Image (cartoon, rainbow, N blue to C red):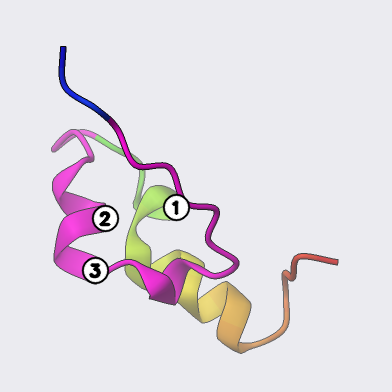
């Protein structure tokens, strides 16, 4: 069995866009895309708080 590393990230920009989007289905909603989530964080529309 392979070992896993677990990390808790605090922002979507801690993941490369191509890695994030590469996990999505081609039929995924645009609201799951890295660019959309990053824009929400950057504009302070969402936050960890």
Residue 17's label in the rendered image is: 3
Q: Relative to 18, does residue 1 appear above or below in the rendering? A: above
Q: Residues within 10 Å of mark 3 (few under 14, many from 20)?
A: some
**N-term-proximal mark, 3 vs 1:** 3
- Residue 21 figure quarter: bottom left
Q: Are marks 2 and 3 in contact (CB under 8 Å)?
A: yes
Within the magenta stretch, is there residue 31?
no
Instruction: Farthest residue to the right: give it.
Output: 49
The magenta-colored residue range is 4-27
Which quadrant of the figure contains the C terminus?
Answer: bottom right
Residue at image location 49% in from the left, 65% down from the top: 37
Q: Relative to 20, does residue 35 appear above or below in the rendering? A: below
Q: Are marks 1 and 2 in contact (CB under 8 Å)?
A: no
Residue 41, how many percent across, how many down? 60, 77
Residue at image location 20% in from the left, 41% down from the top: 23
Which quadrant of the figure contains the N terminus?
Answer: top left
Residue 48 shown left or right of residue 40 in the figure? right
Instruction: Farthest residue to the bottom: give it.
Output: 43
Magenta stretch, main secondary structure, is loop
Residue at disc 1, secondary structure:
helix
Residue 11 shown left or right of residue 16 in the figure? right
Within the magenta stretch, is there residue 10?
yes
Residue 46, how many percent across, how many down? 72, 69
Residue 31's label in the rendered image is: 1
In 3D space, how far apart are the residues under numbered discs 2 and 3 (Cα atoms)? 5 Å
Residue at disc 2, secondary structure:
helix
């Amino acid at each position: 069995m392979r070992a896993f590393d677990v990390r808790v990230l605090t922002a979507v920009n801690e993941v490369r866009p191509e890695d994030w989007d590469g996990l999505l289905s081609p039929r995924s909603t645009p609201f799951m895309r890295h660019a959309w989530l990053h824009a929400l964080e950057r504009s302070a529309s969402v936050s960890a708080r």
